[in-house]
Amino acid sequence: MLHAFPNDAVALPGLAAIMLGFFAFFIALMAARHRATKVGTTPLSQRASITWLWIVVQGIGIGISGFGPVRVELDPLSAKAIVEALVVLALMLGAVWLFHASSRAMGKNWALVARTLTDHTLVQTGPFAIVRNPIYVALFAFMIAMAIAFGHTRNLIIGVPLYALGTWMRVAHEERLLRTQFGAAYDDYAASVKRFVPGVF
């Protein structure tokens, strides 16, 4: 794969931006996990364990996008290096903000594997008022930022389809659980809010 998709030269500012983004995303993830532990003894209503498979597929797609040697050869003060760093920083800040705002809106409803609780609420506030799957949008931005920062944009030819497949299958299972739990309320929500791109898709 490395011969088929040669890596681009990158510079230290872009790498610094992605490292900062990784740290911020980790903090946001830990905060989401902490909020989710407040579920306590609330019993599960439904659980779709099969989504572990699609989480792995998503992870492979993201991993491929960042896989390979990193060629730190650009002048760190060159226009290209500075533009790339700004793009990476913007994508990562957007991804972190979107993930944090989404997981905060979900509160104890947030979980890695698709499931609903007996007192589960249909979240329609925050980013969920704009798109139904903002966390997957955040992860997509994360993947693109990593590919740019590491000079692996050609790897996206493989990474994006794998991520899209894993995401689509996770969404299918999650929507099935939500329709079972909320019925017409979820249908009304789905009819007014798009899955990934506001007003488009």
Image (tube, rainbow, N blue to C red):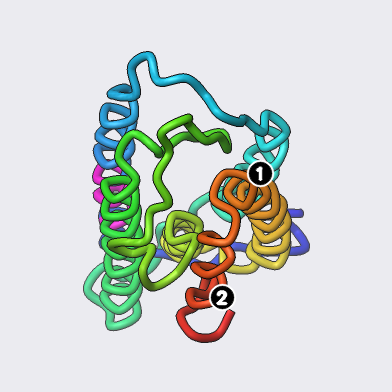
Residue 94 within the segment the image draws in magenta = no
x 65%, y 63%: residue: 160
* Residue drawn at the location 22% of the way across and 73% of the way down: 77
Q: Amino acid at mark 2?
A: Ala
Query: Which residue in the structure is indicated by mark 1?
Result: 60
Q: Is residue 142 left or right of residue 7?
A: left
Judged left or right of residue 9, residue 191 is right
Q: In the rendering, at what x and y percent does residue 69 appear?
A: 55, 48
Q: In the picture, which quadrant includes the C terminus?
A: bottom right
Q: Residues within 10 Å of mark 2 (few under 14, many from 20)?
A: few
State the image coordinates of residue 163 (x, y, percent, origin top left). 65, 55
Kind of residue indicated by mark 1: Ile
Callout 2 secondary element? helix
Residue 151, how many percent across, how many down? 50, 63
Where disc 1 sits, the SS reads helix
Return the mark for residue 191: 2
Magenta part of the chain: 17-24
- Residue 128's image quarter? bottom left
Q: Give the prevailing secondary structure in the magenta stretch.
A: helix
Residue depicted at 38% across the width and 14% down the height? 41
Q: Is residue 22 above or below residue 93?
A: above
Above or below, 24 relative to 141: above
Q: Residue at x 57, y 38 (%)?
A: 114
Q: Residue furthest top?
A: 41
Q: Compare residues 76 and 60 and report the one nearer the observer.
A: 60
The answer to whether residue 194 is above or below residue 181 is: below
